Amino acid sequence: TDIGDILIAMNPFQPLPLYGREVSPLGPSRPGPSAPPTTSPTPLLPQAAERYRHQETGTLPPHIFAVASRAYHAMLGRRGGGPQSQCIVI
C-alpha cells in the first residue's frame, strides 16, 4: 500500500524478491534471500525509476521510487509552489 510520503530504504546488496519484472526490472535473476549471491547484484535499470517519475500517488503500484521522486521534485520546486525543504530520516 501507499501510506504517504514515507520512504523505507533497504540494503541494496541484500536481494529481496518484492517486485516482479513488470514493476522493477532487475536484469538477470538473483538468488533468494537464503542463498548467497553468486555475483555482485545487478543495479536497478534506469527504466524502473523512470516509470515513477512525475506520477501522482496511486496511479501506479506503490514503490520506493515513487516516494523518492516526489521528495526530490518537491525539493527542486517542480511540484508547484516553489522549492520546499525536505527531511529524510535515515
Image (tube, rainbow, N blue to C red):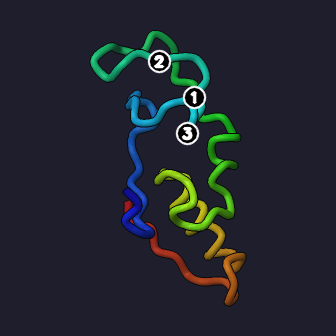
Q: Residue furthest left?
A: 34
Residue 54, placed above or below residue 87:
above
Look at the numbered discs 2 and 1 and tell me whether their residues touch, using CB distance below 8 Å: yes
Query: Looking at the rendered structure, which numbered label has been put on residue 87?
Result: none
Residue indicated by mark 1: 26
Residue 32, placed above or below residue 2:
above
Q: Splitting the image into 4 quarters, where does residue 21 fall?
A: top right
Gap between marks 1 and 3 measured at Cα: 9 Å
**Identity of the amino acid at label 2?**
Arg
> With 50 as the anchor, is 31 left or right in this view?
left
Report the quarter where the N terminus lies.
bottom left
Look at the numbered discs 2 and 3 and tell me whether their residues touch, using CB distance below 8 Å: no
* Circle 3: element type: loop
x, y percent for residue 12: 46, 36
**Identity of the amino acid at label 3?**
Val
Q: Residue furthest front?
A: 59
x, y percent for residue 11: 40, 39
User: At 52% from the left edge and 76% from the top edge, which residue is drawn?
Assistant: 86
User: At 53% from the left edge and 66% from the top edge, which residue is drawn?
Assistant: 57
Residue 71, placed above or below residue 23:
below
> With 27 as the anchor, is 78 left or right in this view?
right
Counting the numbered discs, the total is: 3
User: At 55% from the left edge and 81% from the top edge, which residue is drawn?
Assistant: 85
Gap between marks 2 and 3 measured at Cα: 16 Å
Query: Looking at the rendered structure, which numbered label has been put on residue 30?
Result: 2
Residue indicated by mark 3: 23
x, y percent for residue 90: 38, 60
* Circle 1: element type: loop
